[in-house]
């Protein structure tokens, strides 16, 4: 939903860079970006809501609702006056429509209408009761033959790319009964509706009803001021015609097909989730001290289903793709300083290829804004700087202020690169094709080589960022003290660049009143990751073409690594959140950005000192943050992902146990943002992040190693998993483990992978089955 919020990077941010650096080097925590008030992206909003009403107030009994995780079908059964009625709804991924089928044992009478937008929760009201922009939209409802629909013109705001835009939704109705059209007065609350009445389709004597629904949007619905006259003059809208043509072309004989995760299977001893309703499982768990395997199984399948439902064209929003109300908190944006990253943590390991492709479209849409952000904030050329949020259309740097200075969050590009890097490790080279007209227009083509057209260009821009971040005037001396020397042109031996300014989301040093800092551990880790990926790319892709140039590029990158700061450790041995002698650690915080070396990076895998330091950092957080800032679920999920990488099975188990005993799960098994539901906001990072955690507990992999059950707790018992993918291109056909016998069996689809080390630190590997492609 468009708003009055600006759609460009503030022009004064460039001139503020020197002020920011000086405030940091002088430890002046009073500089407040000139009282900057952060602005926001556009808000995700619902489409039209169809109301199905059984006429005559029948007696309804035996209501049951469930989700078929394999096909993504939502099923409902009940009795109406004793007659059985079934309803199933699914999205046809092939035809890009929603299909609902209703079958009744006896004929029913039903009315179908579209609700007033104003009747939906939170319409017109933002946080703190601020009026919301949808108050200024206009909409009209209509019926054309057996199609009921809505067309909406967005509010007209100067500078908005959607000033002439809008959206529409239509539902085609097929039935063996009789149909007639009537109308009812519109609700008195429907002040943005330009019609006087609301159309209704009345169905009688029907045993079968099928609904086919399609929604779409456009930036060219026409002038806002002409919308009312066009509707009253029965003028047509190209968008509405497109929607109608779409639902009229649908083949309703198509059956729902299995989703991408059909080859993933998890079975735990004691698991029997199909026999229990969600409510029953959640109630039972509250009375069980340990995690119930059958609940964990179902949470895993629920997460896979949700991830696949969001796959194909983009990444998951905070709320996934679902929205049942207006003005969701944080605008249901794509939040990239932890949430999206957690939501896709299990994507590649679960073999969700379509999710990986959708993630790349999500990234490609943003890159032009990312390049402009780096130019505006830092004056950089051909580099990228990631904002905290995107609304899916734009990703300009606007959401920042003194408490959340995301204009100086430098690590984002590295974090967003990792899933693409892992995609290539998992599947090898791939070519993907889009039908998105905006992407085709942006890049001048519809087909992309993942390595050459997505990964490598973005990696080069991320590397260029770190290549340009260093300024020899700002450095640490040989004793590790932060220094500023105006006019200094190069570093001396033993000196290192300061990464200045820097921001460790969303924390600030102890006793320091500004979050604008230097040398955030997250930045240091992301820089190391990006530079090493760049060196790997040069060695693999360029050496054969121009060996001399490649050697020079590698030499420059290695020199840059030596000049950037390294991690520091506090008196407890923990990795410090800021590699600055002058800052104190602040562990009373939900975010753990400084543990980037453990997850999403793999830097702790072959560095025992760093691994121990990250583990101690988690212990410090747990001890000092207890009861203060620890209800945000993404903090617990993030922590569990880190602990899994650190192979701390007990700690991962304890985190999961806390979650299943909290109030975070709704009866759908989707999740709230908080373990105590204190904000009352639906959020999918926990639901999806659980898949990543369980995958990491079961299998760790890199290019040369597969480690079995690295973080699996014996408390979860024996079991079996099939279909997990690895970073060395091998698929786990089947992994079985027996906690009593302390033995493991694994069968691998080797693909085209080279020789791999297969290890299991806690159990004896009884047998390894191999299946190599010819």
Image: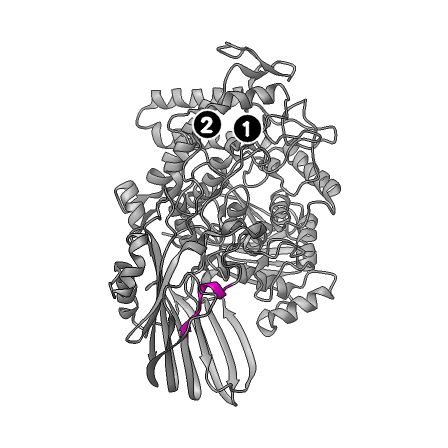
Check contact, mark 2 vs mark 1: CB within 8 A.
yes
Asked whether, in this view, residue 660 is left or right of residue 317, the answer is: right
Q: Position of residue 600 (x, y in %)?
A: 54, 41
Q: Position of residue 500 (x, y in %)?
A: 55, 24
Asked whether, in this view, residue 347 is left or right of residue 358, the answer is: right
Q: What residue sits right under mark 1 in the picture?
A: 34
Q: Position of residue 165 (x, y in %)?
A: 33, 52
Q: What residue sits right under mark 2 in the picture?
A: 12
Q: Position of residue 444 (x, y in %)?
A: 25, 42
Q: Residues within 10 Å of mark 1 (few under 14, many from 20)?
A: few
Q: Which residues are magenta?
A: 113-120
**Is-magenta flag for residue 236?**
no
Classify residue 424 by image quadrant. Answer: top left
**In front: 663, or 108?**
108
Please give the count of numbered marks on the rendered protein. 2
Q: Is residue 692 visible?
A: no
Q: In the displayed structure, would residue 424 be above or below residue 154?
A: above
**Is-magenta flag for residue 118?**
yes
């Amino acid at each position: 939903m468009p708003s009055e919020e600006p759609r460009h990077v503030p022009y004064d941010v460039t001139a503020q860079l020197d002020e920011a650096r000086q405030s940091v080097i002088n430890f002046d925590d009073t500089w407040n970006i000139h009282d900057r008030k952060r602005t926001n992206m556009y808000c995700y909003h619902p489409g039209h809501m169809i109301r199905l009403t059984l006429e005559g107030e029948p007696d309804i009994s035996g209501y049951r609702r469930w989700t078929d995780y394999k096909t993504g079908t939502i099923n409902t059964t009940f009795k109406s006056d004793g007659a059985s009625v079934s309803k199933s709804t699914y999205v046809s991924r092939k035809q890009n429509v929603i299909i609902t089928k209703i079958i009744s044992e006896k004929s029913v009478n039903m009315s179908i209408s579209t609700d007033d937008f104003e009747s939906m929760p939170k319409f017109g009201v933002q946080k703190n009761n601020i009026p919301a922009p949808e108050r200024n939209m206009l909409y009209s409802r209509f019926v054309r033959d057996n199609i009921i629909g809505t067309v909406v013109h967005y509010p007209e705001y100067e500078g908005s790319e959607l000033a002439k835009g809008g959206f529409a939704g239509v539902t085609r109705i097929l039935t063996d009964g009789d149909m007639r059209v009537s109308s009812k007065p519109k609700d008195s609350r429907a002040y943005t509706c330009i019609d006087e009445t609301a159309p209704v389709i009345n169905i009688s004597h029907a045993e079968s009803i099928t609904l086919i629904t399609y929604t779409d949007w456009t930036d060219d619905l026409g002038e806002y001021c002409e919308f009312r006259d066009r509707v009253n003059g029965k003028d047509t809208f190209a968008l509405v015609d497109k929607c109608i043509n779409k639902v009229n072309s649908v083949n309703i004989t198509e059956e729902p097909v299995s989703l991408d995760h059909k080859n993933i299977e998890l079975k735990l001893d004691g698991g029997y989730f199909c026999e229990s309703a969600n409510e029953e499982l959640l109630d039972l768990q509250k009375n069980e001290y340990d995690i119930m395997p059958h609940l964990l199984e179902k949470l895993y399948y629920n997460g896979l289903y949700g991830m696949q439902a969001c796959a194909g064209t983009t990444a998951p929003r905070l709320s996934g793709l679902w929205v049942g109300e207006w003005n969701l908190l944080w605008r249901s944006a794509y939040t990239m300083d932890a949430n999206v990253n957690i939501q896709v943590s299990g994507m590649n390991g679960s073999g969700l290829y379509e999710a990986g492709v959708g993630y790349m479209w999500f990234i490609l849409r943003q890159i032009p804004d990312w390049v402009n952000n780096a130019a505006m904030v830092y004056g950089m050329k051909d580099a990228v700087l990631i904002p905290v949020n995107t609304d899916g259309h734009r990703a300009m740097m606007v959401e920042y202020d003194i408490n959340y200075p995301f204009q100086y969050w430098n690590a984002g590009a590295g974090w967003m690169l990792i899933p693409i890097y892992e995609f290539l490790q998992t599947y090898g080279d791939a070519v993907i094709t889009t039908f998105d007209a905006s992407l085709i227009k942006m890049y001048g083509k519809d087909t992309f080589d993942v390595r050459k057209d997505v990964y490598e260009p973005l990696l080069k821009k991320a590397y260029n960022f770190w290549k340009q971040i260093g300024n020899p005037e700002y450095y640490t001396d040989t004793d590790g003290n932060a220094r500023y020397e105006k006019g200094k042109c190069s570093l001396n031996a033993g000196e290192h660049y300061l990464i200045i300014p820097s921001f460790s989301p969303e924390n600030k040093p102890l006793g320091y009143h500004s979050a604008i800092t230097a040398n955030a551990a997250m930045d240091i880790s992301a820089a190391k990751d990006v530079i090493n990926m760049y060196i790997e790319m040069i060695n693999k892709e360029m050496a054969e073409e121009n060996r001399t140039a490649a050697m020079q590029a590698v030499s420059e990158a290695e020199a840059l690594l030596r000049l950037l700061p390294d991690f520091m450790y506090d008196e407890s041995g923990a990795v410090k959140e800021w590699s600055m002698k002058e800052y104190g650690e602040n562990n009373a915080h939900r975010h753990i950005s400084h543990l980037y070396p453990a997850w999403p990076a793999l830097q702790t895998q072959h560095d025992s000192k760093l691994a121990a330091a990250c583990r101690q950092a988690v212990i410090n957080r747990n001890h000092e943050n207890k009861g203060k800032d620890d209800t945000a679920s993404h903090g617990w999920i993030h922590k569990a992902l880190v602990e899994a990488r650190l192979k701390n099975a007990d700690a991962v188990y304890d985190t999961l146990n806390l979650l299943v005993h909290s109030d975070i799960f709704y009866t759908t098994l989707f999740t709230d943002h908080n373990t105590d539901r204190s904000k009352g906001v639906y959020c999918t990072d926990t639901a999806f992040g659980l898949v990543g955690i369980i995958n990491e507990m079961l299998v760790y992999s890199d290019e040369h190693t597969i480690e079995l059950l690295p973080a699996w707790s014996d408390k979860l018992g024996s079991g079996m998993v099939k279909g997990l993918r690895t970073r060395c291109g091998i698929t786990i056909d089947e992994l079985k483990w027996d906690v009593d016998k302390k033995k493991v069996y694994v069968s691998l689809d080797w693909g085209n992978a080279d020789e791999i080390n297969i290890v299991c630190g806690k159990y004896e590997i009884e047998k390894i089955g191999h299946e190599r492609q010819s």
